[in-house]
Image: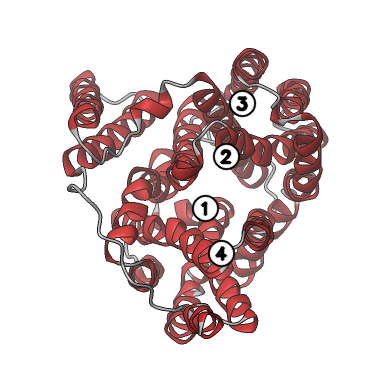
C-alpha cells in the first residue's frame, strides 16, 4: 500500500525528465532575452531613431522588472501553485514579446520589455521550485539543478550568436518574434507534463508595501544613474533621487514589520551570506556592463556586422560555461572562497586591457579582456551560489537562492546603467575614453570584491 501511494504521488522517471526539459526551456528563454538584445541595440537605435539612454532602457526595463519582482514571483508561486504561475509567466512573456516585435516606437518597446520582465520574474523561481518538487531526493535534485544551471549558461553565447544571425538577415524584430512560438510550445508542454501539486497554506500576507518600495527604489536608482550620465536637468534628478530613497526606505521599514518580508534582513545581516551576494552583484555589474558597451564599440565604432559582433562574444562566453564545473570541484574540495578569489584575480588582470582600445584598433585587447572576464565569471558564479547556500539554514535555501538571483539581476541593471552613462554615445569622441575609465572603475570594484572574499567568506 505504501509503495502504491508513493508511486501515485510521484511522477515516473521519464515524466520527471520531461518536466526538467520544460523547466530548462523556460529558464533558457528568460535568460536568452537578457543577452540577445545587446547585439540588436545598434539596429534598434538606427531603426527607431533613439539615443543610447533609451537603448539602455531596452535592456534595463526588462532586468529591473525581473530583479524587482523575482522574490515576489517565488512567494506567489508558493501561495497559488507554481504550475499556475508558470503558465501565467509564459503567457505574459509571449504576449509582451509579440508587442516588442510590433513596437512602432522605442517607448512602446521599453514598456513591452518591462512586461516581459514581469513574465520572467514569474518564470524563474517557479522553474526551480518545480524541479525541486519533481526530484525529491537530494542526489536527484543536485543533478537536475546542475542540468538546469548548465543549460541556462548556454543562453549567454546563444543570445548574441542567434541575434547576430537574425539581425544580419532579417532585422531586429525577429529577435522578439522568435519568442512567440516558443512560449506557445512551452505552455502546451507545461499543461501536458507538469503535475499540479496541492498548495501549502502560508501564514501572513504578502509584503506588498515592501515589494512596491523595492521596485520603486530599484527603478528610481537605475533611472537616476542613466539620467545623470546623459545630463538631464537637476529637477528630474532630484525627483528620481527622492523617489529612490523613499522607495528603499519603505522596503526596509516594511521588512522590519512584516511576518513575510520581501527583504530578509536577518540573513542580510550575516557576513557570510551578504559577502558572496555582493561579489555576485559585482560580477554581473561588470560582466553585463562590459557586454553592453562592447557591443556598441564593435558595431558602432569598429563597424562590424551584428553576426561578427555576436561571434566576438565567444571568448567571454565559452570560459563562463567551461569553468563552471571546475568551480564546483574547487568548491567541493577547498570551499567557495578559493574559487571566488581566483576569479577576482583574473578579472583584476583582465579589465585593464580595455584601456588599450582605440577608435581605429584594439579588438584584440577587447577579446583578451573578454576571455579573462569570462574565466572570472565561470569561477565566481557557481562558487558564489554555493557560498550563499552554505551560509543559510537548510529550511530557507529557497529564499537564499531567490536573494542570490535578485542580487545578480540588480548587478545587471546597474551595470548597464552605469557603463552606458559613463561611456555615453558611440558617436561621441569621448566614448572610447569612457570605456578606459570604466575599465579602471571595474578593476577597483574587483579589488574590493577580492577583499570582501578574503575577509567575509569562509572556506567551510
**Residue 28 or residue 179, whichever sits in front:** 28
Q: Earlier in the sequence, mark 2 or mark 3?
A: 2
- Residue ID for mark 2: 288
Mark 2 to mark 1: distance in Å?
Answer: 9 Å
Which residue position is annotated with label 4? 136
Decide: few, some or many residues near mark 2? Use Cα within 10 Å; few <14, some 14-19, many ≥20: many
Considering the numbered disc 2 on the image, is that residue within a helix, a strand or a loop?
A: helix
Residue 426, label in figure:
none
Q: Quadrant of the C terminus?
A: top right
Say if mark 2 contacts mark 1, CB within 8 Å: yes
Residue receiving disc 1 = 34
Establish if 435 lies above or below 412: above
- Measuring from the top left, give residue 419's x and y in whole percent: 52, 30
Answer with mark 1 or mark 3, whichever residue precedes in sequence: 1
The numbered mark, 2 or 4, whose residue comes first in the sequence reads 4
Q: Distance between the residues labelled 2 and 3?
A: 14 Å
Going by the image, does 254 lie left or right of 430? left
Give whichever of 223, 71 is nearer the camera: 71
Residue 170: x %, y % from top left: 57, 73
Residue corresponding to mark 3:
435
Amino acid at each position: 500500500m505504501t509503495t502504491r501511494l508513493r508511486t501515485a504521488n510521484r511522477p515516473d522517471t521519464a515524466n520527471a525528465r520531461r518536466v526538467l526539459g520544460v523547466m530548462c526551456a523556460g529558464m533558457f528563454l528568460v535568460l536568452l532575452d537578457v543577452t540577445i538584445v545587446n547585439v540588436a541595440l545598434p539596429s534598434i537605435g538606427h531603426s527607431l531613431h533613439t539615443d543610447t539612454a533609451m537603448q539602455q532602457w531596452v535592456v534595463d526595463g526588462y532586468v529591473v522588472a525581473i530583479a524587482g519582482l523575482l522574490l515576489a514571483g517565488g512567494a506567489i508561486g508558493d501561495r497559488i501553485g507554481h504550475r499556475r504561475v508558470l503558465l501565467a509567466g509564459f503567457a505574459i512573456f509571449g504576449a509582451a514579446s509579440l508587442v516588442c516585435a510590433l513596437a512602432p516606437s522605442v517607448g512602446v518597446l521599453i514598456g513591452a520589455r518591462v512586461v516581459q520582465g514581469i513574465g520572467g520574474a514569474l518564470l524563474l523561481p517557479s522553474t526551480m521550485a518545480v524541479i525541486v518538487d519533481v526530484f525529491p531526493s537530494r542526489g536527484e535534485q543536485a543533478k537536475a539543478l546542475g542540468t538546469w544551471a548548465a543549460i541556462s549558461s548556454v543562453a549567454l553565447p546563444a543570445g548574441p550568436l542567434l541575434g547576430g544571425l537574425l539581425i544580419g538577415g532579417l532585422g531586429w524584430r525577429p529577435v522578439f518574434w522568435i519568442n512567440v512560438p516558443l512560449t506557445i510550445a512551452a505552455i502546451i508542454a507545461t499543461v501536458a507534463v507538469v503535475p499540479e501539486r496541492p498548495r501549502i497554506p502560508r501564514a501572513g500576507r504578502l509584503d506588498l508595501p515592501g515589494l512596491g518600495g523595492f521596485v520603486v527604489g530599484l527603478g528610481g536608482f537605475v533611472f537616476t544613474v542613466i539620467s545623470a550620465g546623459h545630463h538631464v536637468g537637476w529637477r528630474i534628478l532630484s525627483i528620481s533621487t527622492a523617489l529612490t530613497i523613499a522607495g528603499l526606505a519603505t522596503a526596509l521599514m516594511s521588512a522590519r514589520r512584516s511576518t513575510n518580508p520581501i527583504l530578509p534582513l536577518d540573513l542580510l545581516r550575516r557576513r557570510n551570506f551578504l559577502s558572496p551576494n555582493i561579489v555576485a552583484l559585482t560580477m554581473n555589474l561588470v560582466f553585463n556592463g562590459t557586454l553592453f558597451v562592447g557591443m556598441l564599440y564593435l558595431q558602432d565604432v569598429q563597424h562590424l556586422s551584428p553576426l561578427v559582433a555576436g561571434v566576438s562574444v565567444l571568448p567571454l562566453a565559452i570560459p563562463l560555461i567551461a569553468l563552471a564545473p571546475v568551480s564546483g570541484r574547487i568548491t567541493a574540495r577547498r570551499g567557495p572562497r578559493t574559487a571566488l578569489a581566483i576569479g577576482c584575480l583574473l578579472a583584476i588582470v583582465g579589465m585593464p586591457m580595455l584601456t588599450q582600445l582605440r577608435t581605429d584598433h584594439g579588438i584584440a585587447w577587447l577579446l583578451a579582456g573578454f576571455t579573462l572576464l569570462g574565466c572570472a565569471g565561470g569561477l565566481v558564479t557557481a562558487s558564489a551560489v554555493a557560498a550563499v547556500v552554505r551560509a543559510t539554514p537548510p529550511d530557507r535555501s529557497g529564499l537564499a537562492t531567490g536573494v542570490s538571483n535578485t542580487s545578480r539581476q540588480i548587478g545587471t541593471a546597474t551595470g548597464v546603467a552605469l557603463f552606458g552613462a559613463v561611456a555615453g554615445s558611440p558617436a561621441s569622441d569621448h566614448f572610447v575614453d569612457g570605456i578606459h575609465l570604466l575599465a579602471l572603475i571595474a578593476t577597483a570594484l574587483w579589488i574590493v570584491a577580492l577583499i570582501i572574499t578574503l575577509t567575509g567568506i569562509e572556506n567551510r
